[in-house]
Amino acid sequence: MQLLDTARLKADRRPAFRALQEGWQLLGATPGQFAQPADLPAEAGWISAPVLGPVADVLQQVGQWSLDGPPRRFDAEDWWYRLRFDLAEGQGPSGLLLHLDGLATVADIWLNGQLILSSTDMFLAHRCEVGQILQASGNELVMVFRSLDEALSKRRPRPRWRAPMIENQQLRWFRTTLLGRTPGWSPPAAVVGPWRGVWLSESPQVELAELALQPRVQGADGRLSVNCTLNAKAGAQLEQVTLILSRQGQTWQQNLSVSADGRWQGDVLVSDVALWWPHTHGEPALYECALQIVGSGQMQALTMSLGAVGFRTIELDQSGDGFALRVNGVPVFCRGACWTPLDAVRLDAPDRAAYEEAIAQVRRAGMNMVRVGGTMSYEADAFYDECDRQGVLVWQELMFANMDYPEEPAFVALAQEEVHQQCQRWQGRPALAVLCGNSEVEQQAAMFGATRDRWVPALFHDTLAQVCRERRPDVPYWPSSAHGGAFPHQGDVGTTSYYGVGAYMRALDDARRAQVRFATECLAFSNAPEPDGLAAMPGGLSLRMHHPAWKARAPRDLGAGWDFEDVRDHYVAQLFDVDPGRLRYSDHDRYLALGRVAVGEVMSATFAEWRRAASVCQGAMIWFLRDLWPGAGWGVVDSLGQPKAPYYYLKRALQPLSIALTDEGGNGLFVHATNETAEPIKASVEVTAWRHGATQVGQGVKEIELSARSAQSWPLMSWFDWFADWSFAYRFGPLTAQVLVAVLRDENGRELARAHAFPGGLNLPVERDLGLQATAGCLAPGYFEVTLVSARFAQSVHWDVDGISPDDAYFHLSPGETRTLRVNLRGKASTAQVLSGGLRALNLDGQVSIQMESGPSL
């Protein structure tokens, strides 16, 4: 018998939990070589797995495969897993349950020679009652994952359109991730095998079979409704079930009533409720939720944790052909990135701490949303826990992308079961902001030439939409990541995949002209990592971008005559007036430096456009947050978790309090300020103009008031009593200033944000000496405070220190400005008391060494 696991109960709270993670053996075989466990060899060919995981992960653990080695088609073979185990001492088999949380993809499972499960959907979790099959000792659990290539070779109806990014169009029939099966952008590590936990548990006293949690906001109060099915063990009867909420020492509770069909239901009212907000707009307040259950006879009273819930409202505003989210009635500019698994081989991260740090990194960047796209996988509970806790919204897609999915009843029923089960996992989670049917299915159909009637598959517009709306009625549903308009990816209607600035190499002003409403993905570039990230590539720091090992990891669309390094080079040429091809072979290090800075400048300029008060854009997701493997991938963070240059530009541009400068042509420069906080602020904006690196040629100061949740814009010339061609629009003489610096300060003079404009372009003259100095003091082993000052303007100052994690990098330093930053060292250097290395600037020839203070200041 198979039962769905709600996954709302935390694993560490499940009764008599025993993970079956160690002691497994793995065997590869030709498709169909072995039909059942009895046919398997006793010992020959088996590999001992240190820890259970997908095939690629196990082979990686034992040193028989690596992403740096020759590619291997894991889909080409049958893969057998075998575990022999005894039950714990004193534990009987009666009532034991076997949990299989993720099986990729065509799998059969035997226990003690008996077939107990067949699965064809890697996104389903299974639970099997095995008490009648288990024995005290000598148990054998066997799993086989059949060759997907073999399954794909069977004749099936052809799709009505093609998805060029996908190697085999018949993948549409199988519920599996596209990662590892999309040459050009994902590493060749197709996920085959158990990719989530396998574990045993005792049958609980009370089983939570179905759960609906609905937190609602009613005026100043919150109301949590629960509707669930609770099944007690035979001979026991439930007498009282109490719903309990708690936060910061306060408790609210209410006894539930039971209906005629056996469902327990009721609600708890929280007066003056603390609302959950994305972190950019307030506190992500959470309440712990539990059921207290009292039964008859020998049944012990128990408390069943249901995890944390949050009270918030999310509304979708489509007025004027737009797409905008309102959280608790407040319009929220959603900005962030498309999420990728933290481990592209295992898919799940190794521990909860990895998710905690990854979401903290999102938060530090000023991002308030991540998109889990349909090309990836459903994330672990720990991911959603951290998004809830840290106040990061989730655009959650169902795992469908680009392809023409079947309408065959069995496939549709499986998809419904999958989505129903995932929605069970997401009950009550406040971070869940949008449920989206798929990634780019409508766009792919339109671009391939399918007729308009095929752009709106019923699977996503009706069938799965109904499941989502029933299970999470508080979360807006959207049928596809690109949807709305005369064609699905029309930028000024609904949502779109926007690549005008980026892959389509349009000028930076296209970000405004396109009138983008909401970009579910955008700004894809091949982003060179920092030296530590380069060192992790095959060939290490000596590798050059023209080398095949480098180009093999440069993202590209299959069939295109260009890759995303060509896109980056295009903007290097535009912004710096250089020939990237010539620079690449004449000065490879400067070529990389200009590429890093160019992408950062493009991204920050684009978001400056989209966050203006007059902009119609209400959200944008960078494609990607993090690389899938070492290389110059799409991520603004490398696969090791270290930020790349664009991350720091975004970190400055996306904060709740921000400032920007834009060139409005003949109207001159404009200043734009944003305050997303709940409090109004009184501040000043100081704009200083610099010529030839150190000569101040103008300064204007304006006292401003920014209302809560507001954005304002001003023409810069209104702050001066005389005219200056600050934007160099009229060109009646030499350039008035090479750099303008705008600083937003609070009433106490504390800097809140900073922005720059380069009227003559970013290609400032390279100088022998900027008067740049850096002094470091050691606060603790591996942790330093660095003070910087420069006599002349220093452009895109960055670190030349191994293993460094700084507060900031690729920042501009004004003449005479003193700036203090904190940095820490990672890895082997994490205990150092001396910071060895230096700083570089884009307009400095050479490096400036970091000077240590007269002794470690521990």
Image (cartoon, grey):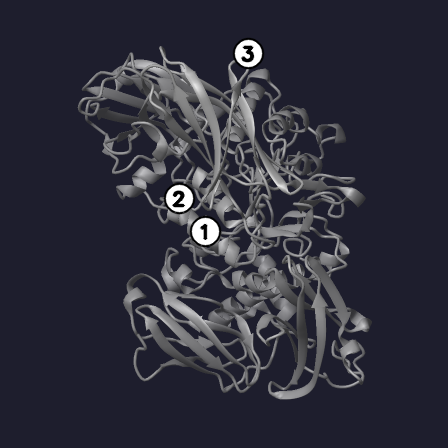
Image quarter hosting the N terminus? top left
- Give the residue pinned by disc 1: 358
Q: How crowded is mark 1: few (under 14 residues within 10 Å), some or many (20 or more)?
A: some
From the viewer's perspective, is 817 left or right of 453?
left
Question: Considering only order in the chain, which callout, 2 or 1, is on the residue closer to the N terminus?
Answer: 2
Real-space Cα separation, disc 1 to disc 2, in angstroms: 10 Å
- Counting from the top left corner in percent of width and height, residue 214 is at 58, 32
Q: Which of 111 and 749 is in front in this view?
A: 749
Q: What residue type is labelled 2?
A: Ala
- Mark number for residue 260? 3
Closer mark to the observer between disc 2 and disc 3: 3
Q: Which amino acid does label 3 sit on?
A: Ala
Element under disc 1? helix
Question: Considering only order in the chain, which callout, 3 or 2, is on the residue closer to the N terminus?
Answer: 3
Q: Is residue 657 above or below residue 420?
A: below
- Give the residue pinned by disc 2: 349
- Counting from the top left corner in percent of width and height, residue 375 is at 54, 38
Residue name at image x 25 percent, y 15 percent: 38
| Tag 1 near tag 2, CB within 8 Å | yes
Q: Which amino acid does label 1 sit on?
A: Ala
Image quarter hosting the C terminus? bottom left
- Counting from the top left corner in percent of width and height, residue 751 is at 58, 73
Q: Is residue 845 above or below residue 532?
A: below
Answer yes or no: is residue 153 visible.
no
Element under disc 2? loop
